Image: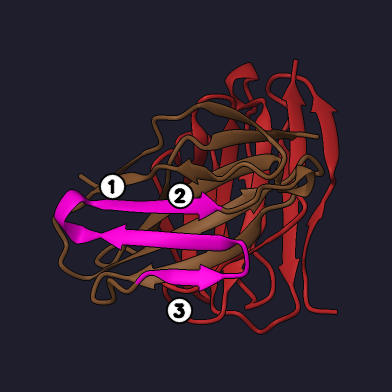
């Protein structure tokens, strides 16, 4: 069965520190998609990135970067030079290509202190 | 403005009193889905719909019903709510008929069942 594990329940850092949020997934599919979503204190869910299983290139978007490694079934998210506005709960998710379900991890709460 | 709307945003009800949470999107999206968010459990998919008149169970469908008579609307029905359905509910939509694209989430509905 598909599963997403975000072992870090909560992380606290001081502004300008780099921080990595871990995501480990399990699937038997060869075709699948991975996602990251952000939930700021205001509560809405914001899409950050989608990656398909055939594209292992790392992605960088400003201070955000993602490291996808099929060998370790991981899709980690790094924030460089964190800012207070990065404080949020971050969810990793895996799509089940065969059933069209989306499986979320339990989330990592990131607190960035000034 | 492209958006997913949910109503009501907050609801307090009593056990057994039928209720409906509405969800509507104005982006002509084919895929729509309902999730519940609970502390420590992340988001879990309740039901999803790949198109009009096509619905399927997610991971936690018990106690819920949905319908998809029109493309834009995907109401969530609790015929006999119980306290364990107290949760934060999100509706989401996606541009294709699959879960493999970015999902746009509504603002959430906080439901309390007494």
Q: Picture coordinates of residue B25 (x, y %)?
A: 72, 72
Q: Indicate the chain on which mark 2 is placed.
A: A
Image quadrant where residue B15 sits: top right
Image quadrant where residue B38 sits: top right
Q: CA distance from mark 3 to mark 2?
A: 21 Å
B110 is higher (above) or lower (below) than B93: above
Q: Residue at x 20, y 59 (%)?
A: A70
Q: State the mark number for residue A90.
A: none
Side of A73 relative to B12 (left or right): left
Q: Is residue B68 at all visible to an observer of this figure?
A: no
Specify few, some or many for label 1: CA neighbours under 10 Å numbering under 14, 14-19, or 20 or more: many
| Residue A24 vs residue A82, the one in the foreground | A82
Q: Indicate the chain on which mark 3 is placed.
A: B
- The overriding secondary structure of the stretch rendered in magenta is strand
Q: Which residue is mark 3?
A: B97
Q: Quadrant of the N terminus of chain A?
A: top left
Q: Residue at x 32, y 61 (%)?
A: A68
Q: CA distance from mark 1 to mark 2?
A: 9 Å
Same chain, marks 1 and 2?
yes
Q: Secondary structure at mark 3?
A: loop
Q: Indicate the chain on which mark 1 is placed.
A: A
Q: Earlier in the sequence, mark 1 or mark 2?
A: 1
């Amino acid at each position: 069965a598909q599963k997403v594990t975000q072992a870090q329940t909560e992380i606290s850092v001081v502004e300008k520190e780099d921080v990595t949020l871990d995501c480990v997934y399990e699937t038997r599919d060869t075709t699948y998609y991975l996602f990251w979503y952000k939930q700021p204190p205001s509560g809405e869910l914001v899409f950050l990135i989608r990656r398909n299983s055939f594209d292992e290139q790392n992605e960088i978007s400003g201070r955000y970067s993602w490291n996808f490694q099929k060998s370790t079934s991981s899709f980690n998210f790094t924030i460089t030079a964190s800012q207070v506005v990065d404080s949020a709960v971050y969810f990793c998710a895996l799509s089940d290509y065969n059933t069209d379900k989306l499986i979320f991890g339990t989330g990592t709460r990131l607190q960035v202190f000034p | 403005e492209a958006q997913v709307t949910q109503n009501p945003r907050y609801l307090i009800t009593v056990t057994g009193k039928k209720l409906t949470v509405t969800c509507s999107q104005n982006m002509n999206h084919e895929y729509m889905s309902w999730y519940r968010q609970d502390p420590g459990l992340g988001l879990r998919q309740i039901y999803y719909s790949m198109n009009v008149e096509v619905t399927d169970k997610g991971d936690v469908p018990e106690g819920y019903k949905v319908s998809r008579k029109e493309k834009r609307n995907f109401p969530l029905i609790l015929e006999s709510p119980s306290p364990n359905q107290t949760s934060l509910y999100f509706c989401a939509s996606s541009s294709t008929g699959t879960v493999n694209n970015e999902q746009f989430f509504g603002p959430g509905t906080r439901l309390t069942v007494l």
